[in-house]
Amino acid sequence: MKHMKYWICVAAVFLLFKNLSAQTTPEDKKATIAHFFDESLTNAPIPAHLHHLTKQIGHRISGSPQAEAAVHWIKLQLEALKPDTVYLQAVKIPVWKRGPKEKAFFQTADHMQPMQVLAFGGSVATKGTLSAEVVEVKSWAELSALPADKVKGKFVFYNRAMDATKIDPFDAYLEAVDQRSIGAIEAAKKGAIGALVRSLTLAKDDAPHTGAMQYADGINKIPAAALGTRSADLLSQTLKDDPTLRFSLEMHCSTLPEIVSNNVIAEITGKEFPDEFITIGAHIDSWDVGEGASDDATGIAQTIEALRLFKTLASKPKRSIRFIFYMNEESGAHGGSKYASAVRENKEKHLASIESDAGGFQPVGFRIDGDPQAVNQIKAYSPLLSQYGMGRILAQHRGVDIAAMKDLSKVLLSLDCASHRLFDIHHSELDTLDKLNYREVTLGAVAMTAMAFLISEYGL
């Protein structure tokens, strides 16, 4: 019995030191990470992939022929790289169509002024031209304080701008996006007939920014649209001079029956721990304006490149790597939810879920949430990426598709990029290929590959 206790203690000490060593920066992996950077910066097909996604396929709203074309094109690219498996995962998704271009204007006693508007994804139509007075608010408290009779039968105009003093514009976006997501609900509670929202951008232009909105059971569904920031400023200024002006809005959008689409998944099976998974992913769909370049053709190209980089190694990774292309991130994240449901049903062990959906600009590191010990281990890898300018590890991941993996994966990691240019083009007609820098996109692909490789080598 004493001998047995002795060997149990020896084994425990051995495992402890093994675990501690796994949490240190693995100097012997510098050469592999350098290989990833050299190989990708020299040979990555990212420019060709981005060109095809944006110029040949174009914007890819869920349920559109373009989205389905992207599914099949991605599958072909993955199969050409010869991973261990490539397959489609069926996903039931909502279908929303914008219809003919929206029209809007406001009218004073002596002037009619056209407005630049864009319906939010999921909005109901106006059923002709909807005309009414406008009440402007810049906070939820301001709306709450208004008596119902001051709002009933009018448009509520949410004019709370993104906070320009935030150093990271993504933080400003996250603080302001509630106007878009629940603005129609809160306006309808007061009897409003429509919701108008200042576009979520710091740019001063007339390119409205769309995005997903919500309705609530038991609350009247009213049309909701974004105003270009110049249109918002003009409307706000004119309301000061003429609070009884009338705003007219015409939208022809519609929601169609759900259809079945697909996630696309490729896998390299781990050579030592095949039942432990690390995922790298991005979303296939985009909004139906612009070319879906930054959001999220960049993530698609980066995820394909990550697979290519793993295939350049002399041996397989220790743990299984999945490369996931999610359908319907923009309007419900049904693809991400479907993948998580399959993981739960199959009782799979996921160490890390990594996502690229931050614009494809200069990568600076990762955003992370998860098991504290695992998070600390990830942070120990920062020096290996810091020499490439992308070693920053901050809390609070920003990946919509991986959110459903919160209780199924030890850590959730989203690629973190400089966002100063992102919200100039986000969800607008300006999201086109010419706004991208191929080198920045390539560096983001390598950052995800290197992180996945380290987690695969050392576990969590």
Image: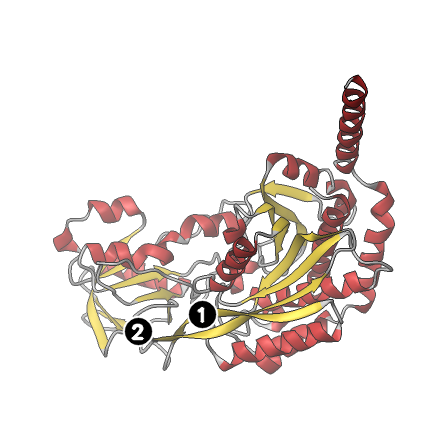
Q: In the figure, is residue 221 to the left or right of 197?
A: left
Q: Is residue 415 visible?
A: no
Disc 2 + disc 1, Cβ < 8 Å: no
- Category of crowding for the residue at label 1, using alpha-carbon neighbours closer than 10 angstroms: few (below 14), some (14–19), many (at least 20): some
Residue at left offset 75%, top offset 44%: 386
Residue 347 appears in the figure: yes
Is 67 on the left or on the right of 210, as rendered? right
Which residue position holds label 2?
A: 104
**Label 2 or label 1, whichever comes before in sequence order:** 1
Instruction: Give residue 54's position: percent from left, percent from top.
Output: 60, 76
Image quarter (top left, top right, bottom left or bottom right) of the N terminus: top right
Name the one closer to the observer, 248 or 77: 77
Which quadrant holds the C terminus? top right
Q: Is residue 376 left or right of residue 31?
A: left
Task: Note whether 455 is above or below 194 in the view shown.
Answer: above
Identify the residue shown where x is 41% and y is 54%. Answer: 177
What residue is rendered at 26% in x and 46% in y? 142
Instruction: Give the residue drawn at x 33%, y 68%.
Output: 123
Is 257 left or right of 51, judged from the image as shown? left
Asked whether 298 or 369 is in front, the reply is 369
Splitting the image into 4 quarters, where does residue 246 fall?
bottom left
| Residue 102 image-quadrant placement | bottom left
Residue 92 tag number: 1
Q: Position of residue 200 (x, y in %)?
A: 44, 58
Secondary structure state at the residue bearing disc 1: strand
Q: Secondary structure at mark 2?
A: strand
The picture quadrant where one finds residue 107 is: bottom left
Specify the farthest residue to the left.
Answer: 149
Label 2 crowd bin: few (<14), some (14–19), many (20+), radius 10 Å: some
